C-alpha cells in the first residue's frame, strides 16, 4: 500500500515516530497480521519523510479482555511524542485504555483516520467518540456471538474438541470408562471421596486429559459435567438434551453435584478436605455441643517399657477427651447394630418394587423434559404466548421437582442396602471401606453422637454409657 507524501509538510508533523501494532487473535502464531500493520505504518511514515524509531508489537492479545498488553504498557512508560498506528482501535478499544493514552499526552497518527492530536480538546473528543463506537461495535458483536453460541447449544450438538472420559467423540459410550463413571456416581452417594475414586481409576490404568493421572479435582470436575446426564449446558444453565447417550440419569447426576459442592463435605479440623478420622466433626461434646477433633497424641508405656501413641478426640474447650481407637470401635458397633433397622425404613416394600418404580419415575422425567422442550419450540414459533408458556412450564417444573425427590429417595434406599454389605465387609477387611463412606453412614443413621467426660485417674477406663447415639427419626 502506497501513501503519497504531503507537500509541503505541516509544521506540526514529527521527524521521528514510534509504531504500535496489535492483533487480537493469531491462531497460527505466525505474526503475519502485526507484520502487515507494521509494514503499512512504515510506508505511511516514510512517505512523509519521518524516521521510524521504536516499534511496539502486541501479537495475539485482545484489547478488551483486560489481559495485560506488554508492548502497550511499555509504550505508555516510554511516552514517545508521536505514534503511528493502523487504526486507533489497535491502540485503544475501551475507554479505560484511551484515558491512559490521553494522560500520556501522545499524538497519534492513524492511517485510517489521520492525525489525532490528543493534547487538544478537539483531538480528545474525536478519540473518545471513535473509541466509544469501537466499544459499541465490540459489544454488539459479542451479543451476536453469544446468541449464536446459545442457539447452537440449544440444538444439543456435542461440539467436543477432545474426547470426554466415558465417551467416544461420536457420542457413543466407551463402556469401560462409562462403567467406572456409573460406579463412581453410586460411590459418592454412599460417601466415597473423590480421592478414593481417583485412586481406583489410576490403579485400573485409566488416565485423564493429556494422558495425566486423575486427581481428586479432575475427578470432581469430570463427575460434575452435565454431559454425564446427557444435558447441554450454556453459561451454567441447562439449555437442551444432548444428542449423545447419558451415563447416568439426571436426578442421580444432580444429587452427586449437590454432594460434591456441599461446603461441609469432608471438612476436617483445619478446614481442609482430606478426611483422616472417622468421627471428627461428627461426634460432639455432651457439655457444650462443640464438635470433637483430634486434640492431642499421648505417648504411653507398656509394661515391658515399650512406648506407644494414643490419639485422642477432644472438645477444644476442655470439657472431655477420649481415645480415638476406643471411641471409633464403640461407634462402629453402634452403627452395625442400628444400620439394618434404618435400612428397613428406607427400603420400603421390596427391592423389586423400588426398581420398577424407579423406571417409572425416570420415564416420567424424560416425558417432562420433552414437554418443556416442546413448550419452548411452540413459543419460538409464535404458537403460544409468554403467559401460556409460563403457566404450563410452572406446572411441569413442580411435577419434575416432586418426581426428582421421589427418585432420590429410592436412590437413598439402594445406597442403604449397599452400606449394610459394605459395613460387614469392613469388619472382616478393615481397609476395604472408604473412610468418607463410613462418615456418610454415621451422618445418615444418627442425629447426634455425644460424648461426656470420661472417668479420670491412672487406672480409669472409658465408660460406654457416657457415649450417647441418638438415631434419626
Image (cartoon, rainbow, N blue to C red):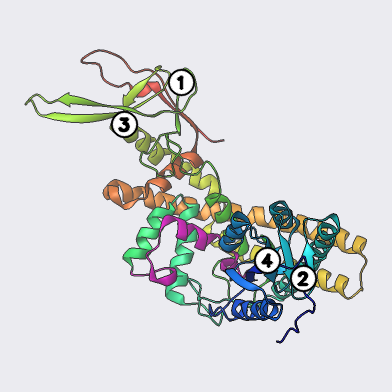
Q: Which residues are magenta?
A: 205-234
Q: Is residue 381 left or right of residue 67?
A: right
Sequence order check, earlier mark of 1 and 2? 2
- Alpha carbon separation for disc pair 1 and 2: 63 Å
Magenta-span inclusion, residue 378: no
- Alpha carbon separation for disc pair 4 and 1: 75 Å
- Alpha carbon separation for disc pair 1 and 3: 17 Å
- Alpha carbon separation for disc pair 4 and 3: 73 Å
Query: Answer yes or no: do the residues labelled 1 and 2 have beta carbons within 8 Å?
Result: no
Q: Nearer the viewer, mark 4 or mark 2?
A: 4
Can you give x and y, in whole percent of width and height, for residue 119 in the image? 78, 55
Residue matched to label 4: 83
Residue matched to label 3: 324
Category of crowding for the residue at label 1, using alpha-carbon neighbours closer than 10 angstroms: few (below 14), some (14–19), many (at least 20): some
Residue matched to label 2: 141
Q: Is residue 305 above or below residue 359?
A: above
Amino acid at each position: 500500500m502506497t501513501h503519497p507524501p504531503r507537500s509541503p509538510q505541516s509544521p506540526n508533523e514529527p521527524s521521528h515516530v514510534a509504531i504500535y501494532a496489535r492483533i487480537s487473535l493469531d491462531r497460527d502464531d505466525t505474526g503475519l497480521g502485526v507484520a502487515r500493520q507494521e509494514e503499512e505504518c512504515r510506508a505511511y511514515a516514510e512517505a512523509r519523510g519521518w524516521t521510524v524509531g521504536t516499534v511496539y508489537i502486541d501479537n495475539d492479545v485482545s484489547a478488551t479482555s483486560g489481559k495485560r498488553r506488554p508492548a502497550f504498557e511499555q509504550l505508555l512508560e516510554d511516552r514517545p511524542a508521536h505514534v503511528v498506528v493502523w487504526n486507533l482501535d489497535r491502540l485503544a478499544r475501551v475507554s479505560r485504555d484511551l484515558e491512559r493514552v490521553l494522560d500520556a499526552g501522545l499524538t497519534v497518527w492513524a492511517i485510517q483516520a489521520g492525525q489525532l492530536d490528543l493534547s487538544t480538546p478537539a483531538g480528545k473528543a474525536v478519540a473518545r467518540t471513535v473509541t466509544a463506537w469501537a466499544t459499541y461495535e465490540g459489544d454488539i458483536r459479542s451479543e451476536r456471538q453469544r446468541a449464536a453460541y446459545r442457539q447452537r447449544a440449544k440444538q444439543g450438538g456435542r461440539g467436543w474438541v477432545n474426547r470426554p472420559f466415558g465417551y467416544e467423540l461420536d457420542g457413543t459410550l466407551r463402556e469401560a470408562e462409562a462403567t467406572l463413571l456409573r460406579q463412581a456416581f453410586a460411590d459418592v452417594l454412599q460417601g466415597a471421596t473423590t480421592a478414593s475414586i481417583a485412586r481406583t481409576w489410576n490403579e485400573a490404568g485409566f488416565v485423564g486429559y493429556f494422558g495425566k493421572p486423575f486427581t481428586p479435582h479432575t475427578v470432581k470436575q469430570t463427575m460434575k459435567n452435565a454431559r454425564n446426564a446427557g444435558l447441554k449446558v450454556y453459561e451454567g444453565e441447562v439449555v437442551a438434551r444432548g444428542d449423545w447417550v447419558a451415563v447416568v440419569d439426571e436426578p442421580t447426576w444432580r444429587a452427586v453435584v449437590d454432594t460434591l459442592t456441599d461446603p461441609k463435605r469432608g471438612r476436617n479440623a483445619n478446614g481442609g478436605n482430606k478426611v483422616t478420622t472417622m468421627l471428627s466433626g461428627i461426634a460432639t461434646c455432651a457439655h457444650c455441643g462443640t464438635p470433637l477433633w483430634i486434640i492431642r497424641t499421648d505417648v504411653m508405656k507398656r509394661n515391658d517399657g515399650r512406648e506407644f501413641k494414643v490419639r485422642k478426640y477432644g472438645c477444644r474447650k476442655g470439657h472431655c477427651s477420649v481415645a480415638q481407637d476406643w471411641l471409633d470401635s464403640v461407634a462402629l458397633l453402634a452403627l452395625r447394630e442400628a444400620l439394618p433397622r434404618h435400612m428397613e425404613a428406607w427400603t420400603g416394600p421390596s427391592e423389586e418394587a423400588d426398581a420398577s418404580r424407579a423406571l417409572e419415575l425416570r420415564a416420567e422425567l424424560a416425558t417432562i423434559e420433552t414437554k418443556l422442550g416442546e413448550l419452548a419450540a411452540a413459543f419460538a414459533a409464535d404458537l403460544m404466548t409468554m403467559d401460556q408458556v409460563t403457566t404450563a412450564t410452572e406446572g411441569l417444573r413442580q411435577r419434575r421437582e416432586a418426581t426428582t425427590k421421589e427418585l432420590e429417595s429410592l436412590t437413598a434406599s439402594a445406597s442403604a442396602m449397599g452400606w449394610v454389605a459394605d459395613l460387614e465387609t469392613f469388619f472382616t477387611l478393615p481397609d476395604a471401606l472408604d473412610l468418607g463412606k463410613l462418615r456418610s453412614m454415621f451422618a445418615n443413621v444418627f442425629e447426634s453422637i455425644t460424648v461426656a467426660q470420661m472417668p479420670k485417674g491412672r487406672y480409669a477406663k472409658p465408660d460406654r454409657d457416657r457415649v450417647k447415639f441418638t438415631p434419626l427419626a
